């Protein structure tokens, strides 16, 4: 049994065929290893290649090169598919079917024993709060309701891995909170969750690990806490004392702002940081607090993307 | 097999929930019954005319049901319904076979309704029970849905959505003309089914019994053609990127 639930090796996808093949790949040599028991957030702007990656996981599209392995087996393996719950981007279902009928078809496809099907469908409908719409036709459902049915069908088989493509899109704030609760409950129950999202604050509250994709390339991935917590230190000092810090560490100050009657200075961490702090103290620096400076996910996300754009532009200019 | 039946179930539910299908059956019944009014125009051959009408209209109804699948598969692929289904433990071949099976079963059901309706109308109009030849001819029309469905699924997979129904309709017309276009047959070398095998209007009209062995062989031929067409479609579909 593999130690990773999802593992890709130099996975690339270029759409098109022969002469109609696009110049740039939608996904470029993605190597990603997702260990068991984590909630993984897959981030990236529109067109970054998130949905392409997810479709490659589900064997809905074929890779141009590279490999995908899910639970140690190649993507598309029927046995593995039985252990996956998948919510596509913008879920669309047969409009003429009633919610219950659609879930019954899914239950049959998932080979859930006939004696359990009804109970399982009722359970998932209750989880997504759609019990009262079980006998309604899917054609009359709003985007948010379809999203809930999509989540219900993804959980029908009590999956080992939940792969959700933009699950929070289309839901109202209440629905989003409910879905977040469902994802957290799934994680507690031992389900591995992989999901893509644009809503960074939600990713920050739910994910253990993240990956940022931009223009088909994976810019970074790893533990969310370690990615966000290694950048410098914040120091609060009394008003009027900020000139001391500026004098001592002119190159290290990232930002300074007046905050609650004191100055909040943000430093880039360097080797002599502690030494400089002591010097500040000796020169009557009146500290209020010293705390590690953590970026939030939003700042980290934009910084990572901007850095990549700068690098790409520099490369294009041949610098 | 359960997966195939689940997909087939979705297809026949869709068709049987279309109001247009019931309107079509009603129109077919009215047109069959209208043959009774052509006694003068047909020089008292209106009974033969009704038999002929019933077979033609039964065929037409089956063709329309089959054409509907050429809308269903491309729409499911375009709108992402197929990606939800194919993310389940379902092979792509199973998906296609399920669609063909669902269409065939629905075609058989609709055809059976039309046959029953025709028998009632015929009995009511002429006070006669239908002959075995009439029943056999109608059964053959109903069975033609099997190769036609496979052909529709094949075209739904290999050609662009916009022209699939037209190409399928033309292909069906060609396939029904294999005797008339015997010289052209070599051009399509068996890719299109010889649907003429299912056309026994004259037998029905003149009361000539068809050999049951022939009907059995027609079923086997239909299944063999369907296997061939669906295998080819599956080969292509397995390489296709699903939206």
Image: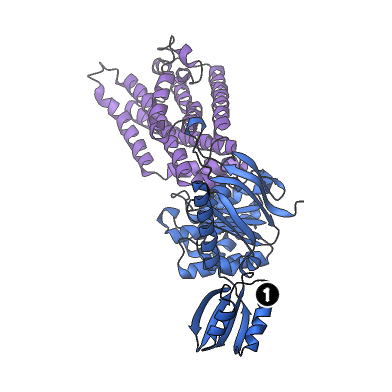
Chain colours: A blue, B purple
Image quarter where the N terminus of chain B lies is: top right
Q: Position of residue B38 (x, y in %)?
A: 25, 23
Q: Position of residue A144 (x, y in %)?
A: 45, 61
Instruction: Identify the subunit bearing mark 1.
Output: A
Residue A118 visible to an observer of this rendering: no
**Residue A42, picture quadrant:** bottom right
Nearer to us in this view, A127 or B111: A127
Residue B100 vertical placement versus A99 (above, below): above
Nearer to us in this view, A177 or B221: A177
Quick one: SS at disc 1?
A: loop
Residue B94 vertical placement versus A71 (above, below): above
Please name the residue shown 62% across and 80% down the image.
A291
Nearer to us in this view, A254 or A189: A254
Residue A110 visible to an observer of this rendering: yes
Please name the residue shown 64% across and 45% down the image.
A10
Residue extending farthest to the left is: B40
Please name the residue shown 36% across and 23% down the image.
B51
Q: Position of residue A34 (x, y in %)?
A: 67, 56
**Residue B173, picture quadrant:** top left
Drawn side of residue B232 relative to residue B38, left or right:
right
Q: Position of residue A82 (x, y in %)?
A: 65, 49
Residue extending farthest to the top is: B183
Q: Dot 1 corresponds to which residue?
A: A272
Residue extending farthest to the right is: A1
């Amino acid at each position: 049994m593999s130690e990773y639930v999802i593992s890709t090796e130099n996975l690339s996808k270029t759409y098109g065929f022969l002469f109609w093949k696009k110049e740039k790949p939608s996904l470029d040599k993605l190597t990603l290893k997702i260990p068991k028991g984590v909630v993984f957030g897959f981030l990236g702007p529109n067109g970054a290649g998130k949905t392409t990656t997810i479709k490659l996981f589900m064997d809905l599209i074929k890779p141009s090169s590279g490999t995908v392995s899910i639970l140690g087996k190649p993507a598309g393996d029927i046995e593995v598919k039985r252990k996956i719950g998948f919510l596509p981007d913008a879920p669309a279902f047969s409009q003429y079917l009633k919610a219950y009928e659609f879930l019954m078809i899914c239950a049959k496809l998932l080979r859930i024993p006939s004696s359990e099907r009804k109970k399982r469908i009722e359970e998932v409908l209750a989880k997504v709060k759609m019990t009262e719409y079980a006998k309604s036709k899917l054609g009359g459902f709003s985007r948010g309701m379809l999203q809930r049915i999509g989540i219900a069908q993804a959980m029908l088989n009590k999956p080992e891995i939940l792969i959700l493509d933009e699950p929070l899109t289309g839901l109202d704030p209440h629905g989003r909170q409910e879905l977040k609760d469902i994802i957290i409950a799934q994680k507690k129950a031992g389900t591995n969750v992989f999901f893509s999202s644009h809503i960074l604050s939600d990713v920050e509250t739910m994910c253990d690990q993240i990956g940022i994709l931009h223009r088909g390339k994976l810019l970074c991935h790893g533990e969310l806490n370690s990615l966000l917590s290694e950048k410098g230190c914040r120091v609060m000092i009394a008003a009027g004392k900020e000139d001391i810090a500026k004098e001592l560490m002119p190159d290290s100050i990232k930002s300074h702002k007046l905050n609650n009657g004191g100055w909040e200075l943000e430093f880039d961490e360097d080797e002599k940081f502690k030494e400089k702090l002591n010097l500040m103290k000796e020169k009557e620096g009146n500290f209020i607090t010293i705390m590690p400076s953590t970026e939030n996910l939003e700042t980290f996300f934009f910084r990572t993307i901007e850095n990549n754009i700068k690098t790409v532009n520099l490369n294009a200019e041949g610098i | 097999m359960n997966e195939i039946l689940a997909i087939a179930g979705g297809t026949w539910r869709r068709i049987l929930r279309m109001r247009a299908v019931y309107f079509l059956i009603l129109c077919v019944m009215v047109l069959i019954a209208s043959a009774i009014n052509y006694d003068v125009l047909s020089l008292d051959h209106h009974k033969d005319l009704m038999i002929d009408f019933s077979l033609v209209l039964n065929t037409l109804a089956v063709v329309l049901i089959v054409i509907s699948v050429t809308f269903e598969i491309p729409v499911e692929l375009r709108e992402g319904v197929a990606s939800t289904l194919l993310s389940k433990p379902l092979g792509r071949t199973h998906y296609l076979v399920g669609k063909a099976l669902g269409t065939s079963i629905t075609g058989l059901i609709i055809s059976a309704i039309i046959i029953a309706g025709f028998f009632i109308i015929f009995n009511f109009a002429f006070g006669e029970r239908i002959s075995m030849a009439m029943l056999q001819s109608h059964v053959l029309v109903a069975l033609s849905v099997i190769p036609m469905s496979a052909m529709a699924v094949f075209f739904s997979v290999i050609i662009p959505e916009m022209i699939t129904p037209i190409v399928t309709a033309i292909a069906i017309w060609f396939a029904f003309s294999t005797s008339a276009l015997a010289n052209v047959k070599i051009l399509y070398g068996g890719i299109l089914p010889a649907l003429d095998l299912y056309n026994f209007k004259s037998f029905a009209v003149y009361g000539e019994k068809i050999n049951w062995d022939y009907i059995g062989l027609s079923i086997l031929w239909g299944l063999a053609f369907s296997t061939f067409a669906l295998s080819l479609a599956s080969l292509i579909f397995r390489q296709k990127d699903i939206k």
